[in-house]
Image: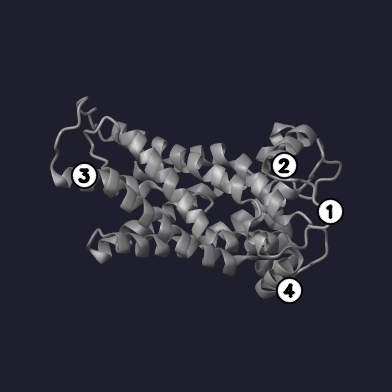
C-alpha cells in the first residue's frame, strides 16, 4: 500500500505541477537574442493563446510513465538506507535522501529528456504542422536510433549533480519542519501541517540545486533543431554566463517555485490520506492531546518515506 499511495500521490503532483514545468523549460531554453516570452505569466498566456491549454501539458506522458519506477527506487533506497543507518536523525535523512536521488537518476534522466523534447515541440503552434515525435516513447526511440545510449542519457551528469543533494535537502528540510511544527497522528491539523512541510521542503530543494537544472535543461534541449550548440557542461556554463550573465541561472525560477509548493502539497495530501485510510487510523480528537513519542515517530517516518520532490 505504501507503494500504491506513493504512485498515486506522485501522479497527483504531476497533474498539478506539469503546466508550471512546461513554462520553466520554455523560459530556460529560449534564445536570449530572440526571446519569445517576457516572463512567467507572459509565457503562460502565450502558450494558452497559441497552443490552447493542452500546450501546457505537452510531454506529460513521460513523467507519468516514469513515476512507478522512480517512486519504487526512492522509497526502497531511502527506507533501506535509514534502516542501515539505524538512527532517525536529520543528517541521516539527508544521506538517505541523497542516496535515493543518486540511484533514481538512472530513470529520471531519460524521462526528463523525453519530457523536455516534447515540451519544446510545436512551440507557438496551436496544431503542429510537423511533429517530430508522436509521444514520449517514440521520442526516446528516435533519439536512441540516432545517437545511441549516449543520446538517451544526455544530461546524466547534471541530473546526478542536481538529484543527489536535491533529494538530500528535501528529506532534511521535511524532517526538520515536521519535528518543529509537530505532526501528531491525533492532531486535527496534521494534514495542513504535512502540506506546509512538504511544500516548503520542495521549494528548499529546488532552490538548493536550481542553477544545475538550468544547465541540464539546456543540454537536453540542445540539438532539437539539428545543430548542437554546446560541447559539454563547461561550455554550456561559459556560453550562458557570457551571453546573459549570472542571472541565466535563475531563468524560470518563479514558475519553478510556484510549481514546487502545490506539487509537493498535492503529493503529501494524497499519500497521507491513502495511508491513513488503508491502515485504519481513526480521526483524532478535536483538541490536540499528548501522545506517546513512538506514535509521532511512526507517523513522521511513514510520511517521510512517501514524499518526493518533484521531477525532481
Nearer-the-camera pick, 95 or 151 = 95
State whether residue 271 appears in this view: no
Residue drawn 22% across and 48% down?
297
Q: Tell me the distance, in whole angstroms, between the alpha carbons under discs 1 and 4.
A: 22 Å
Whether residue 302 is situated above or below residue 150 in the rendered picture: above
Residue 231, numbered label: 4
Nearer-the-camera pick, 76 or 243 = 243
Q: Tell me the distance, in whole angstroms, between the alpha carbons under discs 2 and 4.
A: 29 Å
Which is closer to the viewer, label 1 or label 4? 1
Which residue is label 2 attached to?
A: 43
Mark found first going from the N terminus, 3 or 2: 2
Residue 42 drawn at (x, y percent) = 73, 39
| Badge 2 density bin: few <14, some 14–19, many ≥20, Cα 10 Å | some
Whether residue 4 is situated above or below residue 203 in the rendered picture: above
Mark found first going from the N terminus, 2 or 1: 1
What number of labels is visible?
4
Q: Is residue 281 left or right of residue 291?
A: right
Residue 274 drawn at (x, y percent) = 36, 34
Q: Is residue 79 left or right of residue 133?
A: left
Residue 296, numbered label: 3
Mark found first going from the N terminus, 2 or 4: 2
Which residue is label 1 attached to?
A: 34
Amino acid at each position: 500500500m505504501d507503494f500504491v499511495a506513493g504512485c498515486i500521490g506522485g501522479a497527483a503532483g504531476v497533474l498539478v505541477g506539469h503546466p508550471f514545468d512546461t513554462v520553466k523549460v520554455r523560459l530556460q531554453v529560449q534564445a536570449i537574442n530572440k526571446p519569445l516570452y517576457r516572463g512567467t505569466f507572459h509565457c503562460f498566456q502565450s502558450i494558452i493563446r497559441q497552443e490552447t491549454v493542452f500546450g501546457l501539458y505537452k510531454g506529460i506522458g513521460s513523467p507519468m510513465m516514469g513515476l512507478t519506477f522512480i517512486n519504487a527506487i526512492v522509497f526502497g533506497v531511502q527506507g533501506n538506507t535509514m534502516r542501515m543507518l539505524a538512527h532517525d536523525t536529520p543528517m541521516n535523512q539527508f544521506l538517505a535522501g541523497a542516496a535515493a536521488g543518486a540511484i533514481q537518476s538512472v530513470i529520471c534522466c531519460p524521462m526528463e529528456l523525453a519530457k523536455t523534447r516534447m515540451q519544446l515541440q510545436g512551440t507557438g503552434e496551436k496544431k503542429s504542422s510537423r511533429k517530430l515525435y508522436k509521444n514520449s516513447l517514440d521520442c526516446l526511440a528516435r533519439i536512441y536510433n540516432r545517437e545511441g545510449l549516449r543520446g538517451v542519457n544526455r544530461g546524466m551528469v547534471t541530473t546526478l549533480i542536481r538529484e543527489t543533494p536535491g533529494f538530500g535537502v528535501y528529506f532534511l528540510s521535511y524532517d526538520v519542519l515536521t519535528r518543529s511544527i509537530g505532526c501528531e497522528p491525533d492532531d486535527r491539523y496534521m494534514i495542513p501541517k504535512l502540506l506546509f512541510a512538504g511544500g516548503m521542503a520542495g521549494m528548499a530543494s529546488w532552490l538548493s540545486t536550481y542553477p544545475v537544472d538550468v544547465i541540464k535543461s539546456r543540454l537536453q534541449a540542445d540539438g532539437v533543431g539539428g545543430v548542437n550548440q554546446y560541447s559539454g557542461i563547461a561550455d554550456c556554463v561559459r556560453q550562458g554566463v557570457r551571453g546573459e550573465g549570472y542571472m541565466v541561472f535563475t531563468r524560470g525560477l518563479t514558475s519553478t517555485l510556484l510549481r514546487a509548493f502545490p506539487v509537493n502539497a498535492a503529493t503529501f495530501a494524497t499519500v497521507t490520506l491513502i495511508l491513513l485510510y488503508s491502515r485504519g487510523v481513526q480521526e483524532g480528537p478535536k483538541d490536540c492531546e499528548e501522545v506517546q513519542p513512538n506514535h509521532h515517530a511512526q507517523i513522521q517516518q511513514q510520511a517521510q518515506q512517501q514524499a518526493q520532490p518533484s521531477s525532481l
